[in-house]
Amino acid sequence: MSASPARWGSTAPVLPQPAALADVVEEVTAAAHRRTLRTLDPGRNLVAALLNLDTAEAAEVLAMVRTTDFDDHLNASIFAMLRVIVTERGQQPTPQAVYALARGLSERLGELQLSVDRVAQYVVEVYSLGNPLTVWADARQVVEDAYRRNLGAIGTRLAQMADAYASIADLEKVTGNAVRDWKDQRARLAALTKRASHF
């Protein structure tokens, strides 16, 4: 006598509701979008390019880009570490050099809300992006983005100060300081644009 076929009962699989499936699809799509943006981020690509340069070439780039030009904390932190490796230690900016420096700074990394593992993970990620290495174009874009953010931030600040009836002297002081910063950024942007146009 053959066994009766299994029947669906309490052991039947519980299928997710359509709304729950839609939430999962939305999150997966959003995660993929974020990953794409990270892959194309000029700050990450600049770090990736620096990790493939020799010491002399990296020093040229480091002389024209500031840590404060980055809007991403992690990009800025790794860039600052590369500056130490190249300009202070005279070493080639390799992933291994970044990892070694991170291990030596393990306690201080906590002050930057970083860890040795996070630095290592980031370096591996950017080193294996696989994008074309366009160091001067990426450096130019990082500085241009910083210049635009600075212009916008000062414009907002001045508008708020004016609305609050700040003194003319204070408004002029903020403007004067901003103009000095803008001149520096604009000069670096022009130089980087010239370099990028030759590659």
Image (cartoon, rainbow, N blue to C red):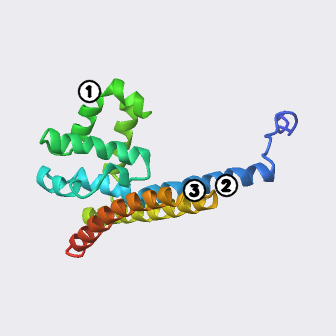
| Outermost top residue | 107
**Where does residue 151 sit, x and y in percent of width and height?**
45, 64
Would residue 36 be visible to someone looking at this image? Answer: no
Q: Which residue is mark 1?
A: 104
Would residue 149 be visible to someone looking at this image? Answer: yes
Q: Is residue 10 above or below residue 16?
A: above
Q: Earlier in the sequence, mark 2 or mark 1?
A: 2
Q: Residues within 10 Å of mark 3 (few under 14, many from 20)?
A: few
Could you say which is closer to the camera, residue 199 or residue 174?
174
- The amino acid beneath tag 2 is Val
Q: Which residue is mark 2?
A: 25
Could you say which is closer to the camera, residue 193 or residue 161?
161
Q: Residues within 10 Å of mark 1 (few under 14, many from 20)?
A: few
Q: Is residue 128 above or below residue 109?
A: below
Q: Is residue 27 left or right of residue 137?
A: right
The structure residue drawn at horizontal position 40% and vertical position 44%, both measured from the top left corner, is 74
**Where does residue 66 sit, x and y in percent of width and height?**
30, 53
- The amino acid beneath tag 1 is Gly
Q: Nearer the viewer, mark 3 or mark 2?
A: 3
Q: Is residue 97 above or below residue 29?
A: above
Q: Earlier in the sequence, mark 3 or mark 2?
A: 2
